[in-house]
Amino acid sequence: MADVNRGNRPLSPFMIGTYYRPQITSVLSILHRITGVALTLAAVLVVWWLVAAAMSPSAFARADWVLTSWIGTLVLLGSLWALWFHMLNGIRHLVWDTGRGIEMNAVTTSGWAAVAGSVVATLVTILLV
């Protein structure tokens, strides 16, 4: 028997676009997980580059060519942004662990601050390097 108090609410939050509007909190939570995985893959690329440098000039030249190509540069720039975002969002979570900043307005503000801060920090890093 269906719950009559349920009203007109959707059955599943996974019906994105039709019934469910993603909030900044859910989007950033998913993005935090994605950037964590992406950073692991980027670390593998950096280790490959370092191992190639220790192996031989030809191995290093191959790895260096891949990482300095346009696609490698794009991957490394994305990894730089992911690093900043993951760190700033992680700090946000650490603040929440102290019981502060968990009001809805503060959560939204800190989420946008993590996004904006990661973009600014990425641009500053690029300009300084």
Image: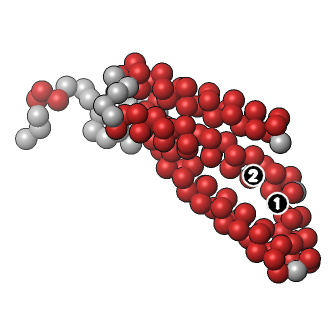
Q: Residue 67 carries which label?
A: 1
Q: Residue furthest top?
A: 105
Q: Residues within 10 Å of mark 2 (few under 14, many from 20)?
A: some
Numbered disc 1: secondary structure: helix
Q: Residue 112 carries which label?
A: none
From the image, tell me which residue sits under label 2: 76
15 or 112: nearer the viewer: 112
Name the side, left or right, on which 5 lies relative to 26: left
Indicate the position of residue 55 as horizontal and vertical percent values: 82, 81
- Residue at 62 percent across and 41 percent down: it is 84
Q: Which amino acid does label 1 sit on?
A: Leu
Q: Is residue 43 above or below residue 11?
A: below
Is residue 48 shown to the viewer in this render? yes
Q: Check contact, mark 1 vs mark 2: CB within 8 A.
A: yes
- Residue at 69 percent across and 29 percent down: it is 120
Indicate the position of residue 47 as horizontal and vertical percent values: 71, 68
112 or 127: nearer the viewer: 127
Q: Residue furthest bottom?
A: 55
Indicate the position of residue 110 as horizontal and vertical percent values: 48, 26
Of labels 1 and 2, earlier in sequence is: 1
